[in-house]
């Protein structure tokens, strides 16, 4: 059985994870924040990875970290670490963020307390329960013949285009969300929606649910508040695409490989 000395700690401050400067981030040392003299204001056991218990922790804002360590954005680690490690780090980040944003009851304002039997917080005054927030989002690759629909949001890194994505709204099915998002953002209708796969996206608490779909009608008409530019692209003339390890990239890579081009030749952000 794995003891505490073999535990993996995912330690955050302000949404960024504490890592050693000189070690590969997918081989973190088994070390507890206390051993580094760090002040923790929240900790939670979050599961196990290869038999090692995993903990999420949030440092106090003024905690001094050792010289040999630094904070990094999880998004930057995505392309560097093992998929399972990233998933656990993402789980840790989401739980820490949930703790930070649910310290008080949204109904009556009393301070919440952790529930020991499940991943939840409870209001001791009114009994309200709070679970970690998950925001399902659909991401869809739309095909028309040998082309796919790609678009740029204003917040993307320069030059990058991706497939369309958007959050599922209350009262809406996933299928309806796909139709609405595609129609709202670029004025196009889709059909033959097929499931591709999913990916937790802990920035801060999305679950990306991926689909492919076929173009069914309509002219491209960009909604300027959400989309800067959009177009139909063939496999051999794609713009720069999102980094590896994202579900958007996995969908684009599959399309590209199907059309005889190596995904390795795609241009991406630095
Ligand atoms: Zn309450």
Image: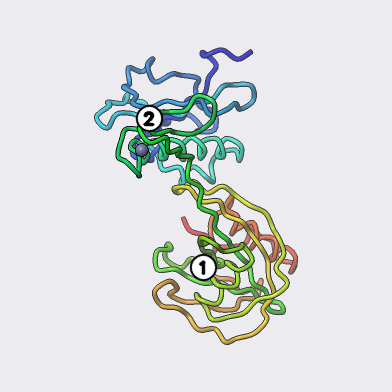
Q: Relative to 202, say whether 211 is above or below.
A: below
Inspect this view and state whether residue 22 appears.
no
Q: Residue furthest bottom?
A: 219
Residue 186, horizontal then vertical, whole percent: 52, 78
Q: Residue furthest front?
A: 126
The image's colouring method is rainbow
For numbered disc 2, what is the local secondary structure? Answer: loop
Cβ(mark 2) to ligand 1 < 8 Å? yes
Please give the name of the residue rendered at 53% of the width and 19% of the height, measured from the top-left corner: 7
Q: Relative to 208, say whether 109 is above or below.
A: above
Looking at the image, is mark 2 or mark 1 earlier in the sequence? 2
Q: Residues within 10 Å of mark 2 (few under 14, many from 20)?
A: few
Position of 162 compared to 235: left or right?
Answer: left
Quadrant where ligand 1 appears: top left
Q: Which mark is residue 161?
A: 1
- Marks 2 and 1, Cα distance to the nearest angstrom? 48 Å
Name the mark nearer the viewer: 2 or 1. Answer: 2
> Label 1 near label 2: C-beta < 8 Å?
no
Position of 40 compared to 226: left or right?
Answer: left
Position of 220 compared to 123: left or right?
Answer: right
Please give the name of the residue rendered at 68% of the width and 81% of the height, measured from the top-left corner: 216
Judging by the rendered image, the residue that carries numbered circle 2 is 124
Residue 249, horizontal then vertical, whole percent: 60, 58
Q: Residue furthest left?
A: 62
Q: Relative to 28, say whether 36 is above or below.
A: above
Please give the name of the residue rendered at 54% of the width and 25% of the height, measured from the top-left corner: 117
């Amino acid at each position: 059985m794995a003891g505490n000395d073999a535990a993996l700690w995912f330690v955050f401050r302000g949404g960024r994870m504490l890592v050693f400067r000189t070690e590969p981030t997918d081989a973190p040392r088994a070390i507890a924040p206390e051993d580094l003299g760090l002040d923790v204001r929240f900790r939670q056991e979050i599961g196990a990875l290869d038999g090692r218990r995993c903990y999420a922790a949030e440092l106090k804002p003024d905690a001094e970290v050792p010289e040999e360590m630094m904070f990094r954005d999880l998004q930057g680690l995505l392309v560097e670490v093992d998929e399972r490690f990233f998933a656990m780090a993402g789980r840790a980040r989401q739980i820490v963020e949930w703790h930070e944003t649910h310290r008080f009851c949204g109904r009556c304002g009393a301070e919440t307390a952790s529930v020991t039997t499940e991943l939840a917080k409870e209001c001791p005054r009114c009994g309200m329960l709070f679970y970690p927030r998950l925001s399902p989002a659909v991401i869809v690759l739309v095909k028309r013949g040998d082309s796919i629909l790609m678009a740029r949001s204003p917040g993307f890194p320069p030059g990058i285009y991706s497939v369309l994505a958007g959050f599922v709204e209350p009262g809406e099915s996933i299928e309806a969300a796909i139709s609405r998002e595609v129609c709202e953002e670029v004025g196009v209708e889709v059909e033959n929606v097929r499931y591709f796969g999913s990916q937790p996206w802990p920035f801060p608490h999305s679950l990306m649910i991926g689909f492919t779909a076929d173009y069914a009608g309509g002219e491209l008409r960009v909604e300027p508040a959400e989309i800067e530019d959009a177009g139909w692209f063939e496999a051999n003339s794609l713009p720069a695409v999102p980094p590896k390890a994202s579900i958007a990239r996995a969908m684009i890579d599959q399309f590209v490989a199907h059309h005889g081009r190596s995904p390795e030749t795609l241009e991406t952000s630095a």
